[in-house]
Image (cartoon, grey):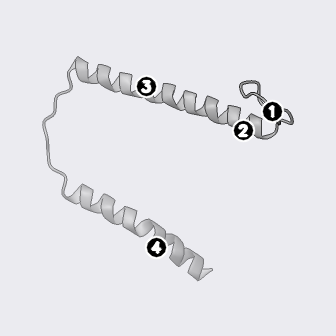
Amino acid sequence: MCLAIYQDVMKKTPLLLVLYFVWMFEARTDAYLDPGSGSMLVQLLLGGVAGAAVLVKLGFARFKDMFRSSPPKDREPESHE
């Protein structure tokens, strides 16, 4: 039991150290975000969502093909001539 708790704490230690040093050495910055920056962030988010949707669709098609007994429609059957 004690070993499991020790291992759990050791897994979190690097993250806690990084967060501590980021918090200790933060500097005050005056930043300005204009409307173009917001538009770019929205475009980045929408592009990421669209890319993820395409990856999921392609991955799901390959997953379905693994369980198919007949060859997929887009592939031609191999001829043994």
**Mark 2 or mark 3: whose residue is earlier in sequence:** 3
Q: Residue at the location (37% across, 22% down)?
A: 43
Image vertical order of residue 78 relative to residue 50, above or below:
below
User: For the residue marked with disc 2, what is the amino acid?
Assistant: Phe
Mark on residue 79?
Answer: 1
User: For the residue marked with disc 4, what is the amino acid?
Assistant: Met
**Mark 4 or mark 1: whose residue is earlier in sequence:** 4
Residue 14, percent from left and from top:
38, 67
Image vertical order of residue 37 relative to residue 29, above or below:
above
The residue that mark 4 highlights is 10
Mark on residue 47?
Answer: 3
Q: CA distance from mark 4 to mark 2?
A: 38 Å
The residue that mark 2 highlights is 63
**Mark 4 or mark 2: whose residue is earlier in sequence:** 4
Instruction: Assess whether mark 3 and mark 4 are in contact (beta carbons under 8 angstroms).
Output: no
Quarter of the picture containing the N terminus is bottom right
